Image (tube, grey):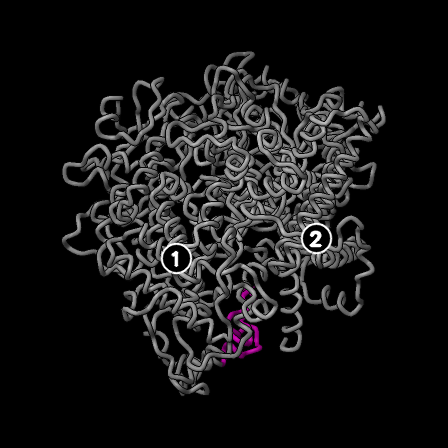
């Protein structure tokens, strides 16, 4: 870890100086400066000595957040509750429900019949983690994973619940976690945004609930830190391609002339903002190459593509996005955020969830193992999870082969891998009904604090002052869950 | 600490000047960013201490920022039962030394506060190390000097009535007075072309046409400038420009915003805003109608329509949502919007607990909340409801007779609109513990306003109308200040108070307090006459001066707080696009009506919604018949997938009230200007239009295009670069296609040239 820390600090110093380099009259134009030429030993010493960030040694450098939008049913995937099968159909006892609030979709139900899963659960790996038959590939890599079976949140509806996970607040307006990281840690590379978003639509639900671009918004942070959506198709980033008929050569000529005129303008007005605009044009130009390069999987060998499954050939699928995530991480993107919709199984759960799990099972497992074999898992934190869980009682009619589950915020399961998180470990427990947490609860803010911790960030100290108040991702809550850390 | 501080601040200043705005900013951000974010006025702060230390201007900002969190107005977080925000506690006896007081006026050696801030023992030191808050050396000295000068209390500056100032003052006199103190002076008047463009964007949001520029250049009379000001203030486009800023404040959108984000009809309210600005409705009336039009005696349809202001917030239709949870959110949104827009107060904190920094209690919050809590509305609406109750119906006849400013198309037979309507005895307002809907306390609130600003008078109705009367009462110290500050910001980029939504303890202090007071008084005395106030600003020398800085000026006042030159500003998202439309000739100038859908990359909505051809909000269908070339004010605003070109250029998201926008520069912006089909089309359109002109040489053609797009003639050097560019592009095309005919070559080359000019810094700037 010392190595990583050293790397990290060096990297910061290098980038800081390079940044200054960009500023001085747009020197970086055309001929890129060698940043090391600018390095003055005395200066760098002061620099690394006077900036106490990271707050402490980081374990991770990058994140891949595999967001499972809709609320995956923990009771059909990871949280094995034989009790529910045993008492299938029994009305959920009040002693368990404790009058807790329900969504408007089931609060009018007269009965809350307890519903066991139709899927087989087995224990896997040396860690003996429980996984259902819905996730055959994930079950093979459980020794890499850290399951948190005691996640809980306050929100009971999608919009506020996703917003809460992503921004630390149920109502819109705060920066996304990726924006916070970009703000706090800066970028690791010169050619790609530090916070990239990939979307895919699940097959589980005919009309999955939509996503909203504010989930990767920068809130009150500078829009430099907003998540940039990479799309499948010919324009992965909006307006990336030159207009038809404009060659690369012509574009280069345009940028050169543009820079010359803009520099003259800077001299005439003494406006130092202009130089940052000049360098932004250069970044844009570099992105025109770097983004398609990152998106072009033709250099991936067959065995890798097979590992991610046949969907990895199909742009815009979850599997393809997993592969892209790895490619972006390899290029030192700080935060890659995937969203996969369709986990909202209010009815027809069995038929829906089997399609839905199939979407993600192989890609997820392949991504984690691919990172591992490249030595990237060590400092890349992978997070898999949704905005809440699902109820242990049936929504609608319970039959032998069919059931549905409503939203359940009081307990659900997520898992993580890499990034200094303890592998082959399950944390937290729910009661026999899988309703309430009985041991080691982890709140959304705790998870956020723990994620930041892995990057050497004290969640209480990374603040941004806006409208007179210092804001944090974790608001005024959150506690690092030390038990989850691989120390 | 003492030794490293100057060095550190040097580094930080260096970073601030060069390149923090760079997109992939590559330094460790956390600590630096806190500094960036909080050290904005470090240049000021490092200058020597003031002769007389002012409690309000020098001391309180420090106490508020570093001490109030534990020793401030929030009783739940007060430590050691000691508050620094009230003078009663200052002179208490010290607990640790009975010979001392906490603050002993005029005697540092007998003040425990001094011991505490100078202490190096962790358990004794204030602020304590675990707070992560540190007093700088200068801050400590300020506090000490204040104590030795007697430590006198003053009420908060913004809550004292604006000072009366003698009649013979004017904007320039205030500005000059400050500048001279700094050894600076005002700049000469800007060149005519630049000044005209500045004025056009500021007053109507659009650039001048070539004909308008030529006319102004030829008019050598003394009244030339004033004539243009008058003409612009009376044009329809003035109302559109003003409305475009009001849309941010009003969080206007065409959809409901949460998850499924269905459509609503609010554009007729937007048409009213344009209309109200254009007829120069006095601001007090403009606001009263929006807050309480329905409560006016014999309220007419127009007054009721205006109340749509407070229905613009987001509304959910997500299945399964608990109605009350969201209804409370809507009421809270109105409360926060009102405080932010009209009172310069951020009250979000006071929803959950007494404010930690300002004397605004949780009771104050819910007293204001109560005014908006008497509406018979739904927390969750149906998927098809475009105007959830309470609402009004308007048909063609009624519109024709009473509301002719609503541009209703023939294809729509009737309009249903959301408005405010008081429902008597509907519900009582209780203070909500932690601000959550399901934890009402037994404390009942009856509607009132914070008495620290102005006591709520007996004769004010206990409803939204009373609230308006309180806002516009002649002794209200805050409303006029907040409003003229926002107007100032419209022209100079930064307000006299640089935090337009926060005039409280944590907000910035005015750079020109007397000017702010003078403007506020004038505004009230002149009957809240907005056009008159705007004219006063744009007629000033301060406004008309050149935007060129000099090394000397940047050294003395690097942020140009004191306005020794006009602050160059980036155009807003709307202006950047509208400039492209107007300069190319594509622009379709039509006021009002339903929102329109201009160019947008295909698939953006589908990716988020799953797409559907049967649902107009799942798939984007571009407008036709010229509607795609309308002013950006009319661009359809879908909250969950807002127009990417607008958002990329820092437009507000419209999710909640915003009174100022970010000003950033990113590579994504470069990509829009380089590759957006709208810009490309405009460039081609200009190139084509050259054919009908009798312009012969490259030079003539370039000057023509350059003036169209940037509003001024190019410098010789620029012209040469552009001529060179034309030749280079010709060469490239000849290499690609030897047989290209003259006509095609001409078109390609001038399209490329126009695109380049659209990307110049100068094009996106108000200089």
Determine which residue is flagged by label 2: B26
Residue drawn at point x = 82 percent, y = 58 percent: A36
Residue A279 place in picture, x, y as percent: 69, 49
Q: Does residue A308 lie above or below B60 as drawn?
A: above
Judge if badges 2 and 1 mark residues of a common chain. yes
- Foreground residue, B412 or A336? B412
Give the label on residue A185, or none.
Answer: none
- Chain to which the residue tagged by mark 2 belongs: B
Q: Does residue B113 lie above or below B359 as drawn?
A: below
Tell me the SS state at disc 1: loop
Determine which residue is flagged by label 1: B222
Determine the main secondary structure of the stretch shown in magenta. loop
Residue A408 place in picture, x, y as percent: 50, 31
Q: Residues within 10 Å of mark 1 (few under 14, many from 20)?
A: few
Q: Does residue B88 lie above or below B449 as drawn?
A: below
Answer whether residue A295 is magenta in the image.
no
Q: Kindly report the distance in space between the C-alpha atoms of the residues bearing marks 2 and 1.
A: 52 Å
- Foreground residue, B256 or B487? B487
Q: Quadrant of residue B78?
A: bottom left
Kindly tell me whether residue A96 is visible in this rendering. no
Q: Which residues are the magenta region?
A: B115-139
Residue A364 place in picture, x, y as percent: 71, 30
Kindly tell me whether residue B345 is visible in this rendering. yes
Q: Residues within 10 Å of mark 2 (few under 14, many from 20)?
A: many
């Amino acid at each position: 870890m010392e190595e990583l820390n050293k790397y990290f600090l060096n990297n910061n110093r290098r980038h800081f100086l390079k940044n200054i380099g960009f500023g001085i009259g747009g020197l970086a134009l055309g001929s890129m400066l060698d940043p090391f030429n600018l390095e003055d030993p005395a200066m760098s010493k002061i620099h690394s000595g006077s900036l106490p960030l990271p707050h402490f040694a980081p374990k991770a450098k990058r994140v891949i957040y595999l967001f499972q939008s809709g609320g995956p049913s923990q009771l059909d995937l990871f949280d094995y509750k034989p009790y529910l099968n045993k008492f299938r159909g029994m009305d959920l006892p009040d002693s368990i429900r404790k009058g807790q609030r329900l969504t408007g979709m089931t609060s009018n139900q007269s009965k809350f019949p307890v519903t066991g899963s139709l899927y087989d659960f087995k224990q896997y790996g040396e860690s003996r983690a429980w996984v259902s038959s819905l996730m055959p590939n994930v079950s093979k890599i459980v020794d890499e994973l850290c399951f948190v079976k005691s996640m809980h949140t306050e929100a009971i509806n999608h919009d506020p619940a996703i917003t809460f996970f992503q921004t630390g607040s149920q109502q819109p307006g705060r920066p996304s976690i990726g924006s916070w990281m970009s703000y706090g840690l800066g970028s690791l590379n010169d050619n790609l945004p530090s916070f990239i978003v990939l979307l895919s639509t699940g097959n589980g639900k005919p009309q999955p609930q939509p996503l909203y671009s504010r989930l990767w918004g920068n809130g009150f942070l500078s829009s430099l830190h907003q998540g940039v959506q990479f799309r499948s198709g010919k324009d992965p980033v909006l307006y990336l391609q030159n207009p038809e008929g404009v060659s690369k050569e012509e574009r280069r000529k345009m940028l050169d002339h543009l820079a010359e005129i803009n520099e003259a303008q800077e001299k005439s007005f003494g406006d130092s903002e202009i130089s940052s605009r000049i360098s932004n044009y250069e970044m844009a130009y570099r992105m025109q190459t770097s983004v398609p390069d990152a998106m072009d999987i033709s250099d991936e060998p067959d065995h890798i593509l097979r590992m991610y499954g046949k969907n990895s050939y199909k742009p815009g699928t979850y599997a393809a996005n997993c592969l892209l995530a790895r490619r972006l991480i390899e290029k030192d993107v700080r935060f890659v955020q995937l969203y996969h919709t369709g986990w909202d199984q209010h009815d027809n759960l069995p038929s829906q969830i089997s399609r839905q799990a199939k979407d993600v099972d192989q890609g997820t497992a392949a991504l984690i193992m691919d990172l591992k074999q490249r030595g990237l898992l060590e400092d890349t934190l992978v997070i898999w999870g949704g905005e809440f869980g699902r109820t242990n009682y049936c929504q609608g009619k319970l039959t032998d082969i069919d059931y549905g589950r409503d939203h359940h915020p009081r307990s659900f399961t997520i898992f993580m891998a890499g990034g200094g998180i303890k592998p082959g470990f399950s944390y937290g427990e729910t009661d026999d009904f899988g309703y309430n947490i009985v041991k080691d609860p982890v709140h959304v803010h705790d998870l956020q604090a723990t994620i930041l911790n892995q990057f050497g960030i004290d969640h209480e100290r990374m603040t941004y002052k806006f409208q007179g108040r210092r804001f944090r991702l974790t608001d005024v809550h959150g506690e690092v869950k030390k038990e989850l850390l691989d120390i | 600490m003492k030794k490293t501080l100057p060095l550190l601040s040097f580094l930080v200043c260096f970073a601030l000047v060069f390149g923090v705005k760079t997109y992939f900013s590559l330094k460790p951000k956390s600590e630096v960013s806190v500094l960036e974010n909080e050290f904005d006025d470090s240049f000021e702060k490092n200058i020597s201490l003031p002769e007389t230390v002012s409690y309000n201007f020098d001391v309180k900002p420090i106490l508020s920022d570093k001490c109030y969190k534990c020793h401030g107005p929030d009783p739940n977080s007060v430590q050691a039962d000691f508050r620094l925000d009230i003078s009663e506690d200052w002179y208490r006896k010290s607990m640790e030394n009975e010979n001392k007081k906490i603050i002993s006026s005029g005697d540092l050696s007998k003040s425990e506060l001094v011991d505490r801030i100078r202490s190096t023992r962790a358990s004794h030191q204030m602020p304590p190390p675990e707070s992560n808050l540190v007093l700088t050396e200068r801050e400590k000295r300020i506090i000490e000097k204040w104590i030795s000068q007697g430590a006198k209390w003053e009420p908060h500056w913004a809550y004292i009535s604006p000072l009366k100032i003698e009649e013979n003052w004017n904007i320039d006199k205030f500005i000059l007075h400050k500048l001279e103190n700094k050894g600076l002076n005002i700049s000469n008047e800007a060149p005519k072309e630049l000044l005209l463009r500045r004025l056009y964007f500021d007053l109507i949001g659009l650039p001048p046409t070539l004909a308008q520029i030529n006319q102004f250049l030829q008019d050598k009379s003394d009244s030339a400038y004033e004539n243009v000001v008058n003409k612009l203030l009376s044009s329809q486009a003035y109302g559109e420009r003003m409305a475009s800023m009001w849309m941010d404040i009003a969080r206007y959108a065409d959809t409901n915003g949460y998850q499924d984000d269905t459509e609503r009809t609010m554009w007729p309210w937007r048409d009213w805003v344009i209309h109200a600005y254009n007829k120069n409705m006095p601001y007090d009336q403009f606001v009263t109608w929006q807050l309480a039009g329905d409560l006016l005696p014999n309220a007419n349809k127009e007054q009721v329509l205006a109340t749509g202001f407070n229905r613009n917030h987001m509304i959910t239709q997500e299945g399964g949502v608990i109605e009350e949870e969201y209804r409370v959110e809507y009421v809270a949104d109105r409360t926060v919007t009102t405080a932010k827009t009209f009172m310069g107060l951020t009250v979000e904190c006071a929803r959950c607990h007494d404010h930690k920094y300002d004397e605004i209690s949780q009771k104050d919050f819910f007293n204001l909340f109560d005014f908006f809590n008497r509406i018979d509305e739904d927390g969750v609406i149906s998927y098809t409801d475009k105007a959830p109750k309470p609402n009004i119906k308007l048909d063609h006849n009624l519109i024709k007779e009473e509301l002719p400013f609503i541009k209703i198309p023939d294809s729509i037979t009737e309009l249903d609109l959301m408005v405010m309507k008081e429902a008597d005895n509907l519900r009582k307002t209780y203070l909500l513990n932690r601000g959550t809907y399901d934890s009402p306390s037994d404390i009942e609130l009856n509607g009132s306003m914070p008495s620290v600003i102005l006591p709520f008078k007996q004769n004010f109705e206990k409803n939204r109308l009373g609230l308006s009367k309180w806002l516009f009462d002649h002794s209200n110290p805050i409303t006029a200040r907040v409003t003229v500050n926002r107007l100032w910001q419209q022209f100079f980029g930064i307000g006299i108070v640089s935090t337009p939504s926060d005039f409280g303890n944590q907000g910035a202090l005015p750079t020109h307090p007397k000017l702010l007071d003078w403007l506020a008084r004038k505004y009230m005395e002149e009957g809240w006459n907005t056009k008159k106030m705007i004219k006063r600003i744009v007629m000033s020398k301060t406004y008309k001066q050149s935007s060129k800085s000099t090394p000397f000026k940047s050294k003395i006042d690097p942020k140009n707080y004191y306005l020794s030159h006009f602050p160059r500003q980036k155009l807003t998202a709307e202006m950047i696009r509208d400039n492209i439309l107007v300069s190319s000739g594509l622009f379709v100038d039509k006021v009002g009506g339903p929102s329109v859908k201009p160019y947008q990359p295909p698939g953006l909505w589908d990716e988020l919604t799953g797409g559907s051809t049967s649902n107009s909000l799942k798939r984007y269908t571009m407008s036709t018949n010229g509607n795609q070339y309308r002013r950006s004010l009319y661009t359809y605003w879908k909250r969950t997938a807002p127009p990417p070109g607008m958002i990329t250029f820092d437009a507000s998201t419209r999710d909640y009230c915003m009174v100022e926008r970010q000003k950033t520069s990113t590579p994504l912006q470069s990509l829009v200007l380089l590759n957006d089909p709208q810009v490309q089309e405009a460039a081609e359109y200009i190139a084509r239009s050259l054919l009908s002109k009798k312009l012969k040489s490259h030079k003539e053609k370039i000057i023509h295009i350059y003036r169209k797009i940037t509003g001024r003639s190019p410098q010789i050097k620029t012209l040469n670069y552009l001529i060179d560019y034309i030749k280079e592009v010709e060469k490239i095309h000849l290499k690609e296609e030897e047989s290209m005919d003259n006509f095609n070559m001409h078109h390609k080359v001038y399209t490329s040239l126009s695109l380049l000019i659209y990307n110049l810094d100068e094009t996106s700037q108000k200089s």
